[in-house]
Image: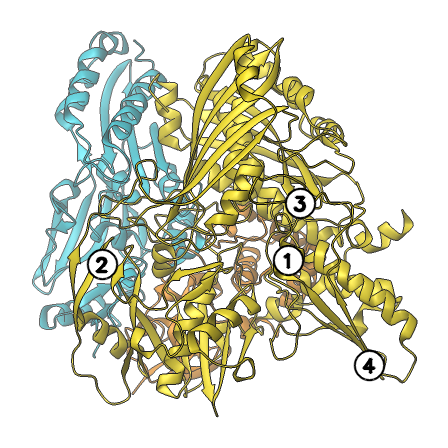
C-alpha cells in the first residue's frame, strides 16, 4: 500500500518510500518536471509547489506527510484562470529570462495572492524572498505580480 | 529615429509560454529509462600524484570510465589543451576529475563512488597567487614615458585593491547528456557554445566531424559559467556513452557546481598614480589574477582586465604589468565582465581616493579625466566613436540626485544609521579582443526563406535567458519587413547550424546580429514568393580598426565600446555593520536596445549580480584547498529582500558597426556596480576601503576603526 | 522502509515508545540530510500538537504549529512574531514548526531564542506521562537535547508576563533565507520606577543559547538611576560571559555586535552611560 495523496486534483498513490522527497516523486514517478532541483536544501525555491494552496519547497517534503493533503504543481496550476492572469502579467512585465525560477515564482505569486490579494511591494518582495532568481534582478517579477494583482481583480 | 523606435519596442518573449507553464524541458527534464546516470569521482587533495585506484567489484550494468577510455587525446581543448578529460598522473586541485561511475541507479552509483579508494602521493599545494611560482600568462602594456611622468610628478599615490571569487549560481546546474548510436555521438546539454564543445569532444574521441553533433538544450542561466565547463563535462559524458553504448546523463548537484566549476578570477591590483597640476599624468599598474589549476580562459580574461586597467580615463603615460598565476584551486573562468570588473573596481576606487587626496569632488575629478572620441586607448588604438560619458553622468545625476545626497551625507551626524552614495564610470569592450573575430572565430550565419513565407535563422548562438530567441528573429523580421511570427530561430545543433561563434563577450547581437542583418538584406533582394532561398554570410572585419597585436598590445583592442555609469546608495547600521542598499541606478550606452524590455532585464540582472559581488558573495578556501561554503545556505546571493528597486536607463548612441545601431550589452551592467557600492560604503563608514566584497564584518571593522 | 502517520497523540507516543523513528513535523531541517531509508513519525497533522491557546497568563503553542500559523494567530505576542516573521522565507515558514525549530538543537534557532529569554517551559510527553522542562535545561550543547528516546515535544509554554517591552535583533547574512550570525533578545519590565524584570538571551554565539540570569539579575529591583550607576558593571560582566565560538563569521565580530546591541538595549530603557 503506497502513499496516497491528492496531486493536481486527483488522488494518486506513490510507489516510493514515505521518506522520499516530494520533488523526486513528482519528477521521476509522475513525470511532472516543472518543479526543478536547484539546491536540494530548501534555499532556492526552484522546486516550489503548493501544499494545500501554500508555497513549500518540494525538496524539503517527505511524501509520507502528504495523506490527507493536496499538492499542486505548475502543471496543475496552469489550467486555472489565476494562472492566466499571472502568465499575462509576467509577459507584459518581461518577468522571464532563463525561466528556471519561473514556475516557482508563479506558484509563489499564487500563494501570496491567495493569502493577500492586494500586497504592497514590500509584501511581494517578502512573498518571493525564498525564490532565487539570478537573471532578472527581481524588478520585473515584482512588477508582474503587481500587475497580476491589479488586472486579476476578483480572482483572489 | 523612427526605425529605432520600432526595433526598441518590446514584444512578448518567444520562450515565455514554455517557461512560465513549466513545459520547457531543460536537460534534467529529458528523461528516458535508457539513460544511465554518470557521476564523477574527484581528487580529494589539492596537488599530488595518483598512486593507486582500487574500485570494488561492479554489479552488472555499472562501469567506471577513466583516462584509459579516452580514444583520442586526453585533453579538453579550451584555448590551450592542458585540462585533462580525466586526470592521468597528477591531480592539480581538489575536485580534479579522476573517473566517472556510470550505471542505471543513482543511489547505486553513489554507493560505488563511496567505495572507490584513491591513494595519492601528496605534493605541496600553492594556494596564494602572489607567491605562486608558475605564471600561466604575463602581459605588459606600455605607452608614453612612465619614468618621466613619475619623475616630474608633484605627488605619487599608491594603493592596492583586491577582489574575490564570484560563483555564477545559474539556477540550473551544469547538466549534459552523451548519446551514442550507430557510431554517432550526440552531446546535448546546458551550454553556451555548441562548437566549443564540438571541437573539444571531437579531439577527445578522435572522431570525424560527421560522427558527432552537439545540441544546446534550453539553458537555465549561464553568465559565463557554461562557456568552457561544458566542454569538460561534454567530453566526459561522450567518452562514457561510447564505452557504455548507452546514453549517459550527468547532472550536477548544487554542491558539486559550487565546489568544482569555474568562478570569477580573484585579483590583486596595485596602482601608482603620478599627479601633476592636479591631473593624473601616469598610471603604473600591477595586476595579478588567480587562474586556478589549469589555463582554460585565463589568457583572455587577463587580457581584458589589463586593457581596461586605466578605466574610462585618458591617461597619456601607462604601464600595465599583469599575470595569471597558477594555484592549486578550481580553474577560474568566464563570468559576466570577464576580467573587466576586477580592474575597473581598482581604477574607480583609486581615482576616487586620488580625488579625495587632492580635495576635489570625485565625480568632477573623474569626468575631467574621462576619455573622449578621438582619444587614444590604453593600447594606442582610438575611441573611434562618440563617448557618451558626460551624458551618462548627467542622466545618472537626474535619476539619483547623487550630488545632493553626497553633500548631505558628508555632513550627517554620527547616529546609528549612516548613509553613503558612490558613483562609477566604466566601459566594456565589445566582442573578442583584437583580431579574434577575424582570425579565430570567423563567424558564419545562415538564413533560409521558405516557400511558405516563413524564415529560419541558423546560428550557433544560444538563448540562456538573455533573449536571443526573441531578438534575433525580431532583427531579421524587421529587416525583411515581415511579421516576427514568421521567423524561427533554429535550435543550436551543430548538424544544422553553422559556426557563428560562441555566445560570449557580448558579441551575439553586435557581431552575429550584424551578419544576420546583412543576410536578411540580401535575402530580401533574392527571395521570391513560393521559393526557398538560403543566404549565408560571413564576418567582415571593420576596416576602420587599427590592427591589434597581442605581442605588444598595440592597436584597437575592440571594434567598439559600450559605456555606463552606476550610482549606489547604502545605509549602514553602526551597531552591527549591516548594510541596506537603498538604491542602485545604472545608465547604459548599448547603442540601440533591440527590445527595450529584454535590455532592461539584462541591465537589472547584471546590476544585482554586481551588488552581490560587492556585498555578500565570497568563496572561502581552507588551507587544504577545499571550498568550505559550497551550499546555497553558505554561498549567498541576493534575494528579493536584498534587492533595491533597480533603476536602469539608456542613452541612445547608435553604433556604426552593429545591426540597427546595437552593440554589446550583456556584460556591461555588472562591471560598474562593485566600485559604486564600495564607494558608497566608504562614505557611510567614513574610512577608505580597498576590497570587494565589503561585507558586514568589513563594515563594522571599518566603523570601529580597524582594518577593512 | 516503514514510516508512520499517527492520527492522535496517543498513537504517536505508542509508536515512539515501540519503534526507532525520527519525529518529523515540518521536515525543513530533517530533509536537508534526508536519508531515503529514514523512518519518520509524521506529526504535522496530530491535532493535539496544533493548538495555540492562552492558559493562565501563558501562551501554549503546540509543537507542530507552523510559523505561518503562529504569525496569523492574534494570541502570539509581537516579540515572537518578530523573531519568526523573517525566518528563512515563506515556503519554509509554511512548513516549519516551533517544535522542529527547538528540537533541532541549534543555538541559531530563531524561535528558541525567544522561548529562552521568556523562560519558557517545554512539555515533553511519553506514554508514561509528561514532564515540564525549562528550555534552558533542554539543550545539552553540540546540538543535543534532553529529549528522551520515548518522548515527543508536545507543547511550548511561554509566560506572557514580560513580553511587552522587548528588544530583538538578528544579524543575518542577508535579507531573507538568512541563518542567524548573531542574535539578541532582551526584556525589561519597569513598574513604579523599579526594574521588576530584566532578561537577555544570545543566539549563535555559543553551543547553546546563552542566558545569564545571574548577571541580568543585578538590574532587578533597582531604579533606572541606580541601574545607570551599575551599567558599567553589567556590561563588564556580560563582556566576560560572552565568549563566541569561532565560525564562518569571526568571534570578534560577534562579540562586538552583541556588546553594541546590549548597550543599545540599555540605552533604549533609559539606562544610559
Image vertical order of residue C149 relative to residue B329, above or below:
below
Toward which corner of the image does residue B371 lie, by quadrant? Answer: top right
Disc 3 crowd rating (10 Å Cα; few below 14, some 14-19, many 20+) is: many
CB within 8 Å, label 2 to label 4: no
Could you tell me which secondary element the residue under label 2 belongs to? loop
Compare residues B271 and A8 and report the one nearer the observer: B271
- The residue tagged 1 is B439
Q: What separation in Å lies between label 3 and label 1 (alpha carbons)?
A: 14 Å
The disc, 3 or 1, on the residue closer to the chain's N-terminal end is 1
Q: Quadrant of the C terminus of chain C?
A: top left
- Chain B: what color? yellow
The disc, 4 or 1, on the residue closer to the chain's N-terminal end is 1
Discs 4/1, front: 1
Q: What separation in Å lies between label 3 and label 4 (alpha carbons)?
A: 36 Å
Q: Are marks 3 and 1 on the same chain?
A: yes
Image vertical order of residue A116 relative to residue B56, above or below:
above
Q: What separation in Å lies between label 2 and label 1 (alpha carbons)?
A: 40 Å
Could you tell me which secondary element the residue under label 3 belongs to? loop
Measured from the top left, where is residue B226 in percent x and y?
A: 50, 60
Q: Which mark is residue B44?
A: 2
Amino acid at each position: 500500500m503506497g502513499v496516497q495523496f491528492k496531486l493536481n486534483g486527483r488522488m494518486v498513490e506513490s510507489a516510493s518510500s514515505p521518506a522520499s522527497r516530494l520533488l523526486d516523486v513528482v519528477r521521476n514517478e509522475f513525470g511532472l518536471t516543472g518543479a526543478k532541483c536547484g539546491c536540494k536544501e530548501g534555499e532556492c525555491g526552484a522546486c516550489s509547489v503548493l501544499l494545500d494552496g501554500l508555497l513549500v519547497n518540494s525538496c524539503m517534503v517527505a511524501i509520507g506527510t502528504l495523506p490527507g493533503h493536496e499538492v499542486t504543481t505548475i502543471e496543475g496550476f496552469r489550467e486555472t484562470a489565476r494562472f492566466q492572469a499571472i502568465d499575462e502579467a509576467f509577459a507584459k512585465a518581461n518577468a522571464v529570462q532563463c525561466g528556471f525560477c519561473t514556475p516557482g515564482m508563479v506558484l509563489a505569486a499564487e500563494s501570496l495572492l491567495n493569502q493577500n490579494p492586494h500586497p504592497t511591494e514590500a509584501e511581494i518582495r517578502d512573498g518571493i524572498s525564498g525564490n532565487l532568481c539570478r537573471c532578472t534582478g527581481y524588478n520585473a517579477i515584482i512588477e508582474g505580480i503587481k500587475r497580476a494583482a491589479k488586472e486579476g481583480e476578483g480572482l483572489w | 529615429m523612427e526605425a529605432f523606435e520600432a526595433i526598441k519596442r518590446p514584444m512578448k518573449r518567444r520562450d515565455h509560454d514554455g517557461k512560465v507553464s513549466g513545459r520547457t524541458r531543460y536537460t534534467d527534464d529529458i528523461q528516458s529509462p535508457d539513460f544511465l546516470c554518470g557521476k564523477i569521482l574527484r581528487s580529494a587533495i589539492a596537488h599530488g600524484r595518483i598512486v593507486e585506484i582500487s574500485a570494488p567489484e561492479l554489479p552488472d550494468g555499472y562501469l567506471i570510465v577513466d583516462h584509459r577510455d579516452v580514444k583520442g587525446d586526453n585533453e579538453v581543448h579550451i584555448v590551450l589543451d592542458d585540462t585533462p578529460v580525466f586526470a592521468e598522473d597528477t591531480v592539480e586541485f581538489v575536485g580534479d576529475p579522476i573517473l566517472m561511475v556510470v550505471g542505471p541507479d543513482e543511489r547505486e552509483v553513489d554507493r560505488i563512488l563511496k567505495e572507490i579508494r584513491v591513494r595519492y602521493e601528496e605534493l605541496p599545494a600553492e594556494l596564494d597567487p602572489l607567491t605562486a611560482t608558475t605564471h600561466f600568462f604575463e602581459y605588459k602594456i606600455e605607452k608614453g614615458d612612465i619614468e618621466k611622468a613619475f619623475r616630474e610628478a608633484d605627488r605619487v599615490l599608491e594603493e592596492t585593491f583586491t577582489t574575490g571569487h564570484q560563483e555564477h549560481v545559474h539556477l540550473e546546474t551544469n547538466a549534459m547528456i552523451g548519446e551514442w548510436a550507430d557510431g554517432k555521438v550526440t552531446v546535448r546539454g546546458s551550454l553556451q557554445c555548441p562548437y566549443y564543445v564540438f571541437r573539444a569532444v571531437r579531439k577527445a574521441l578522435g572522431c570525424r566531424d560527421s560522427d558527432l553533433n552537439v545540441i544546446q538544450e534550453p539553458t537555465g542561466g549561464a553568465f559565463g559559467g557554461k562557456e568552457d565547463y561544458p566542454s569538460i563535462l561534454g567530453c566526459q559524458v561522450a567518452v562514457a556513452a561510447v564505452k557504455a553504448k548507452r546514453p549517459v546523463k550527468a547532472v550536477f548537484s548544487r554542491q558539486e557546481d559550487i565546489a568544482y566549476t569555474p568562478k570569477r578570477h580573484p585579483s590583486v591590483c596595485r596602482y601608482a598614480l603620478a599627479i601633476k597640476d592636479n591631473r593624473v599624468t601616469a598610471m603604473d599598474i600591477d595586476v595579478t589574477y588567480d587562474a586556478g589549476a589549469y589555463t582554460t580562459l585565463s589568457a583572455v580574461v587577463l587580457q581584458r582586465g589589463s586593457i581596461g586597467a586605466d578605466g574610462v580615463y585618458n591617461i597619456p603615460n601607462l604601464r600595465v604589468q599583469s599575470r595569471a598565476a597558477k594555484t592549486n584551486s578550481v580553474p577560474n573562468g568566464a563570468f559576466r565582465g570577464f576580467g573587466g570588473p576586477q580592474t575597473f573596481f581598482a581604477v574607480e576606487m583609486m581615482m576616487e581616493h586620488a580625488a579625495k587626496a587632492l580635495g576635489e569632488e570625485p565625480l568632477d575629478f573623474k569626468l575631467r579625466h574621462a576619455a573622449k572620441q578621438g582619444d587614444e586607448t590604453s593600447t594606442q588604438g582610438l575611441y573611434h566613436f562618440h563617448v557618451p560619458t558626460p551624458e551618462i553622468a548627467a542622466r545618472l545625476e537626474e535619476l539619483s540626485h547623487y550630488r545632493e545626497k553626497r553633500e548631505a551625507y558628508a555632513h550627517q551626524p554620527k547616529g546609528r544609521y549612516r548613509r553613503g552614495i558612490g558613483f562609477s564610470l566604466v566601459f566594456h569592450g565589445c566582442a573578442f579582443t583584437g583580431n579574434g573575430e577575424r582570425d579565430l572565430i570567423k563567424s558564419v550565419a545562415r538564413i533560409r526563406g521558405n516557400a511558405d513565407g516563413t524564415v529560419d535563422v541558423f546560428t550557433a548562438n544560444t538563448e540562456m535567458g538573455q533573449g536571443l530567441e526573441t531578438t534575433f528573429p525580431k532583427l531579421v523580421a524587421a529587416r525583411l519587413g515581415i511579421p516576427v511570427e514568421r521567423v524561427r530561430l533554429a535550435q543550436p545543433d551543430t548538424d544544422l547550424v553553422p559556426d557563428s561563434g560562441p555566445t560570449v563577450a557580448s558579441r551575439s547581437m553586435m557581431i552575429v546580429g550584424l551578419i544576420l542583418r546583412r543576410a536578411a538584406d540580401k535575402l530580401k533582394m533574392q527571395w521570391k514568393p513560393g521559393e526557398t532561398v538560403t543566404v549565408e554570410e560571413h564576418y567582415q572585419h571593420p576596416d576602420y580598426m587599427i590592427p591589434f597585436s597581442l605581442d605588444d598590445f598595440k592597436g584597437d583592442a575592440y571594434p567598439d565600446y559600450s559605456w555606463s555609469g552606476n550610482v549606489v546608495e547604502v545605509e549602514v547600521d553602526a551597531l552591527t555593520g549591516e548594510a541596506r542598499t537603498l538604491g542602485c541606478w545604472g545608465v547604459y550606452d548599448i547603442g540601440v536596445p533591440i527590445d527595450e524590455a529584454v535590455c532592461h532585464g539584462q541591465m537589472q540582472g547584471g546590476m544585482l549580480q554586481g551588488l552581490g559581488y560587492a556585498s555578500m558573495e565570497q568563496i572561502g578556501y581552507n588551507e587544504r584547498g577545499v571550498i568550505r561554503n559550497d551550499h546555497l545556505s553558505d554561498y549567498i546571493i541576493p534575494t528579493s529582500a536584498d534587492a533595491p528597486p533597480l533603476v536602469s536607463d539608456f542613452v541612445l548612441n547608435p553604433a556604426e558597426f552593429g545591426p540597427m545601431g546595437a552593440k554589446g550589452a550583456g556584460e556591461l551592467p555588472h562591471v560598474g556596480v562593485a566600485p559604486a557600492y564600495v564607494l558608497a560604503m566608504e562614505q557611510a563608514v567614513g574610512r577608505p576601503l580597498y576590497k570587494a566584497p565589503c561585507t558586514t564584518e568589513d563594515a563594522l571593522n571599518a566603523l570601529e576603526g580597524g582594518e577593512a | 522502509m516503514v514510516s508512520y502517520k499517527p492520527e492522535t497523540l496517543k498513537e504517536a507516543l505508542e509508536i515512539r515508545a515501540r519503534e526507532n523513528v525520527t519525529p518529523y513535523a515540518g521536515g525543513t531541517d530533517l530533509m536537508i540530510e534526508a536519508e531515503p531509508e529514514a523512518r519518520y513519525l509524521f506529526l504535522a497533522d496530530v491535532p493535539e500538537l496544533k493548538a495555540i491557546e492562552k492558559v493562565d497568563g501563558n501562551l501554549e503553542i503546540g509543537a507542530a504549529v507552523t510559523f505561518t500559523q503562529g504569525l496569523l494567530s492574534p494570541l502570539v505576542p509581537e516579540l515572537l512574531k518578530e523573531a519568526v516573521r523573517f525566518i528563512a522565507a515563506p515556503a519554509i515558514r509554511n512548513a516549519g514548526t516551533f517544535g522542529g525549530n527547538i528540537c533541532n538543537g541549534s543555538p541559531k534557532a530563531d524561535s528558541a531564542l525567544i522561548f529562552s529569554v521568556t523562560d519558557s517551559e517545554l512539555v515533553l510527553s511519553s506514554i508514561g506521562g509528561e514532564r515540564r522542562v525549562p528550555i534552558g535545561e533542554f539543550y545539552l550543547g553540540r546540538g543535543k537535547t534532553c529529549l528522551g528516546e520515548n518522548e515527543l515535544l508536545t507543547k511550548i509554554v511561554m509566560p506572557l508576563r514580560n513580553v511587552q517591552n522587548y528588544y530583538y535583533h538578528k544579524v543575518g547574512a542577508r535579507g531573507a533565507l538568512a541563518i542567524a550570525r548573531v542574535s539578541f533578545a532582551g526584556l525589561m519590565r519597569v513598574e513604579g520606577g523599579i526594574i521588576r524584570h530584566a532578561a537577555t538571551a544570545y543566539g549563535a554565539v555559543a553551543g547553546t543559547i546563552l542566558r545569564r540570569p545571574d548577571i541580568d539579575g543585578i538590574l532587578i529591583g533597582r531604579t533606572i538611576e541606580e541601574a545607570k550607576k551599575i551599567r558599567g558593571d553589567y556590561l563588564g560582566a556580560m563582556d566576560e560571559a560572552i565568549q563566541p565560538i569561532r565560525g564562518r563569521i569571526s568571534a570578534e565580530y560577534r562579540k562586538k555586535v552583541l556588546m553594541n546591541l546590549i548597550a543599545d538595549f540599555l540605552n533604549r530603557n533609559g539606562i544610559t552611560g
